[in-house]
Image: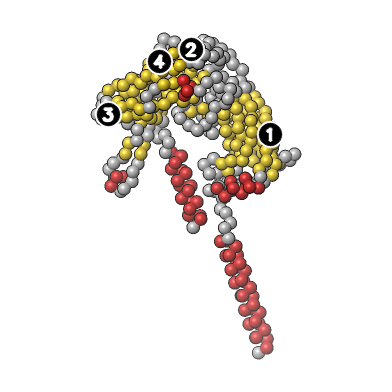
Amino acid sequence: MMILKRMGLILATTIMSFAPLIGQTNADGTDNVGLRVSAVLPENQRDTGQSYFDLLVQPKDKQTLVVNLINTTDKPQTVNTAVTAAKTNINGVVEYTPSKNKLDKSVPFDMAKIATLPKSVEIPANSTKKLAIQLDIPDKQWQGVVAGGISVTQAEVNDSGDNKKAGISVRNRYAYAIGVMLQTKQDSTVKEELNLARVTAGQINLRNAVISELHNTSETYLKKVSIKSKITRVNGTKVLYESDKSNMKIAPNSIFNYPLSLEGHSFKAGRYTMDMTVKSEKNTWHFTKNFTITSKEAKDLNNKDVTIIHDEGFNWWWLVALVAIILAIIVYIVRRRRKAQTN
């Protein structure tokens, strides 16, 4: 029964991993939902060859951004809108849509907190609606880039036809993101800074992983990032787990929770060392940090890992029964032989 429960949990996790955004695309994207978005570039656009906002601003500026929402269908559409800071997900991909990923405290300001816009917009059939976003730039200076994004998410749409007849409700949401970069200088060079704040035992999608919390404390993107990491016991030389990933990107002033998967293995309590080399397009960093996994942490995480088959007493009972059967057979054979000898 427990194995069946775990199989169901794995299936649910797989489905949920595809659920948040189906058909995500960038500005000027279009697809069969009949919705397009495009940025109306203002006069203070630094690079007019881009389709996202790349703006030169000054402290205390008030800037209104305009995005065209184009509905090419014969029915009105409703979209949800938001402005968020650019963040880095566990795959080393920069996200411009709402997420639970975090910013480093070094960020000059959170773009989500300086933006004012409607939460939803209804676009009439075969029409274009302008979405206005007001940015109130704080009264402060910064050297590099403050990055974020404007997300436009289609309201839920229910499929019909065979799925409806079968009693299945399928909801697809299409999201579009337009990047926003704010700078106070036309050209500026910012030194890349990265540090490893801590290493902990954790999980990704209910699977055991060691999480390295990397902080980009610089106001610039770290591009073409590669990471080689390995785990040993403290003062040990045997590599227990290792990973090698490349072609990643870290958003300015963001936290990158880099996971090293245990590939279905159980956590064991003890003291460990993380050895990590991180390379960007311009720099290389080498980090070593000790961390501890307690017995309670190991037990709790192992119990939650859906790839580990746990002993719940079931296998022991079968083992006891098997031993009893073998002993009974041996006793039976011995008695038969003794009886044969006496005859």
> Are the residues at dot 3 and dot 2 in contact (C-beta closer than 8 Å)?
no
Neighbor class of circle 1 (other Cα within 10 Å; few <14, some 14-19, many 20+) is some
Side of 45 relative to 278 (left or right) = left
- Residue, disc 2: 60
- Residue, disc 4: 64
The span from disc 4 to disc 2 (Cα, nearest Å) is: 13 Å
The span from disc 1 to disc 2 (Cα, nearest Å) is: 42 Å
Q: Work out whether mark 3 precedes mark 1 in sequence or the reverse, and give the earlier one.
A: 3
Closest to the observer: 106 or 214?
106
Q: Is mark 2 on a helix, strand or loop?
A: loop
Asked whether the viewer can see residue 224, the reply is no
Q: Which mark is residue 289?
A: 1
Find residue 297 and report its horizontal and vertical position in percent: 62, 45
Q: What residue type is labelled 1?
A: Lys
Q: What residue type is labelled 3?
A: Pro
The residue shown at (47%, 23%) is 113
